[in-house]
């Protein structure tokens, strides 16, 4: 997240009508708060700490006397406590007169990614008269907004990803046509080689999956369990990468193809449904934002899921529609989810996310079509990298 920026935090608090933000950690339990406060997760933390940032005025650090050094870099007044009684007195004095406070809490745990403060601490803070609300959208604004440098760097990565994906399918087609052997592992290794050549990096190996393996969204081949790719096989490739720079952001796409001279109707039918779901989600984002209307992550999930459920494949779409993309592949911003969770975070200018509905017919094949979306700083959405997949290509045609 970079250096703690008090002016930015207070500006955001005022814009969202919060009276303040109470950041809390105990023994590394709140990684989000630690990141906001620029405290390394490797720091030796053994006592409770609170950092109160009012929308206006001077912050207050409430820290145990033996660990005061952990918050020394943060702006504000410092109150050192030792006993439970002195901690309670310090919080009571600090929070007096403040009502609407943000913290890493999600009502009914609807957004578990942002739920870091335990129920007992929530009760403790409420005992001082605080009205607690989720800091989820605050975290989006602080951590999930791309800079212009990140956007420009990602442009090249995203375009390379599309090119490498296409070249991997060409490699499969050329090899099968020539009557030579190629398996899932070899395709994965080819993609990794191309990443290296283009100055790209990934945290986990890409996925090339054939036939029934494509029905497992998290399948990954290994040298010991890699299927050969033969004429007539269905192939899914999922690949994601960024540059090696710590502050770079990810690109993540999934395409499918068929290793033959024509594509059987069963693949075309399912792909068309997935494509329609994908496009319904993207079109909803465009429509809302162009008309200056708000949109939340769960609504994007609903748009794709309704298409797939109407086609009779609802039970075969068993994951969320998309995830936040930041310096983390699954970032701290809003996810496109009303399935695993109900994500009510707003899609704000500067955020990026994937749209990737899928239909998985276990024991046969699975189809997922994944695009990345970026909302520019004027609130205009765009798909990054290249054109979304429109049909299933026949690799031997």
Image (spheres, rainbow, N blue to C red):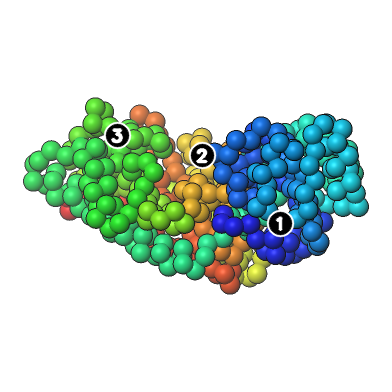
Foreground: disc 2 or disc 3: 3
Q: CA distance from mark 2 to mark 3?
A: 21 Å
Binning the other alpha carbons within 10 Å of mark 3 as few (below 14), some (14 to 19) or many (20 upward) gives many
Residue 160, x across and y down, in percent: 31, 60
Q: Secondary structure at mark 2?
A: loop
Q: Secondary structure at mark 1?
A: loop
- Which of marks 3 and 1 precedes in the sequence? 1
Q: Secondary structure at mark 3?
A: loop
Residue 217, x across and y down, in percent: 41, 37
Left or right? Give the position of 82 relative to 300: right
Residue 350, x across and y down, in percent: 56, 64
Q: Kindly indicate the quadrant of the structure image that contains residue 249.
A: bottom left
* Residue 318 badge: none
Q: Quadrant of the N terminus?
A: bottom right
Camera-side residue: 171 or 359? 171
- Which of marks 3 and 2 precedes in the sequence? 3
- Which of marks 1 and 2 precedes in the sequence? 1
Residue 133, x across and y down, in percent: 77, 47
User: Mark 1 = which residue?
Assistant: 75
The reply to whether dot 2 and dot 3 touch (C-beta < 8 Å) is: no
Residue at image x 61%, y 41%? 31
Left or right? Give the position of 147 relative to 61: left
Binning the other alpha carbons within 10 Å of mark 2 as few (below 14), some (14 to 19) or many (20 upward) gives some
Left or right? Give the position of 176 relative to 147: left
Is residue 291 shown to the viewer in this render? yes
* Residue 319 badge: 2
* Residue 221 badge: 3
Q: Is 55 located above or below residue 78 in the figure?
A: below
Q: Is 49 located above or below residue 36 in the figure?
A: above
Residue at image x 17%, y 53%? 397
Foreground: disc 1 or disc 3: 1
């Amino acid at each position: 997240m970079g250096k703690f920026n008090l002016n930015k935090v207070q500006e955001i608090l005022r814009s969202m009508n919060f009276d303040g933000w109470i950041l809390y950690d105990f023994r590394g339990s709140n990684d989000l708060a630690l990141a906001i406060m620029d405290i390394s997760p490797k720091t030796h933390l053994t006592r409770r700490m609170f950092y109160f940032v009012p929308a206006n005025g001077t912050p207050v650090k409430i820290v145990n006397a033996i660990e005061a050094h952990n918050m020394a870099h943060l702006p504000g007044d410092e109150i050192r406590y030792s006993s439970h009684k002195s901690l309670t007195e310090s919080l009571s004095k600090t929070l007096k007169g403040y009502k609407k406070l943000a913290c890493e809490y999600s009502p009914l745990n609807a957004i578990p990614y942002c739920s870091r403060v335990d129920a007992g601490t929530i009760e403790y803070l409420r005992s001082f008269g605080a009205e607690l609300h989720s800091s989820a959208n605050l975290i989006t604004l602080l951590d999930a907004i791309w800079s212009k440098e990140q956007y420009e760097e990602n442009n090249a990565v995203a375009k390379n990803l599309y090119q490498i994906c296409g070249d991997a399918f060409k490699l499969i087609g050329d090899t099968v046509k020539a009557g030579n052997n190629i398996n899932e592992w070899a395709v994965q290794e080819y993609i990794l080689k191309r990443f290296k050549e283009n100055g790209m990096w990934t945290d986990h190996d890409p996925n090339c999956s054939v036939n029934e393996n494509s029905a497992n969204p998290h399948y990954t081949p290994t040298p010991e369990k890699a299927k050969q790719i033969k004429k007539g096989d269905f192939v899914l490739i999922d690949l994601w990468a960024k540059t090696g720079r710590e502050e770079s952001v990810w690109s993540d796409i999934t395409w499918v193809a068929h290793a033959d001279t024509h594509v059987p109707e069963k693949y075309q039918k399912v792909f068309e449904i997935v494509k329609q779901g994908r496009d319904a989600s993207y079109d909803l984002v465009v429509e809302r934002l162009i008309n200056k209307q708000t949109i939340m992550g769960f609504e994007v999930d609903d748009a794709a899921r309704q298409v797939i459920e109407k086609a009779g494949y609802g039970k075969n779409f068993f994951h969320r529609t998309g995830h936040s993309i930041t310096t983390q592949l699954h970032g701290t911003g809003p996810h496109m989810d009303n399935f695993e969770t109900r994500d009510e975070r707003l899609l704000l200018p500067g955020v990026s996310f994937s749209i990737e509905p899928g239909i998985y017919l276990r024991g046969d094949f699975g189809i997922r079509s994944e695009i990345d979306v970026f909302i520019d700083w004027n609130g205009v959405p765009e798909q990054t990298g290249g054109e979304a997949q429109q049909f299933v290509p026949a690799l031997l045609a």
